[in-house]
Image (cartoon, rainbow, N blue to C red):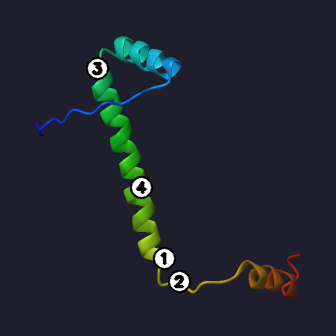
């Protein structure tokens, strides 16, 4: 198990109540639920960063030139 660190987090009252009720219903601690949610968010960020990295060598096309090309090809 990793070392735990303490942090103070302030929730909106209704969000706190929902979290507390959900934690009780799922037999999890609020800390475990918040940790899981933060991990999921960070994993999404990592996925997005990998996608950006994979596409960084693509040629950049301005919106104007893209739309003009669509018009030339008869799409618009």
- Residue at 66 percent of width and 83 percent of height: 61
The residue that mark 3 highlights is: 29
Badge 3: few (under 14), some or many (20 or more) residues near its Cα, within 10 Å?
some
- Up the image or down, 48 lies above or below 65; here it is above
Residue contact at pointers 1 and 4, CB within 8 angstroms: no
Mark 3 or 1: in front is 3
Residue nearest the viewer, comparing 12 with 33: 12
Residue nearest the viewer, comparing 54 with 9: 9
Mark 1 or 4: in front is 4
Residue contact at pointers 1 and 2, CB within 8 angstroms: yes
- Residue at 11 percent of width and 38 percent of height: 3
Q: Quadrant of the N terminus?
A: top left
Label 2's element?
Answer: loop
User: Residue 72: percent from the left, percent from the top?
Assistant: 86, 87
The residue that mark 2 highlights is: 58
Residue nearest the viewer, comparing 58 with 20: 20
Q: CA distance from mark 4 to mark 2?
A: 20 Å
The reply, left or right, for residue 6 in relation to residue 10 is left
The residue that mark 1 highlights is: 55
């Amino acid at each position: 198990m990793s070392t735990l660190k303490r942090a103070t987090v302030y929730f909106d009252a209704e969000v706190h109540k929902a979290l507390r009720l959900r934690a009780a219903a799922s037999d999890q601690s609020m800390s475990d639920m918040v940790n899981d949610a933060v991990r999921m968010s960070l994993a999404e960020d990592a996925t997005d960063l990998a996608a950006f990295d994979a596409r960084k060598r693509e040629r950049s096309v301005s919106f104007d030139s893209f739309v003009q090309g669509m018009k030339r090809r008869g799409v618009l």
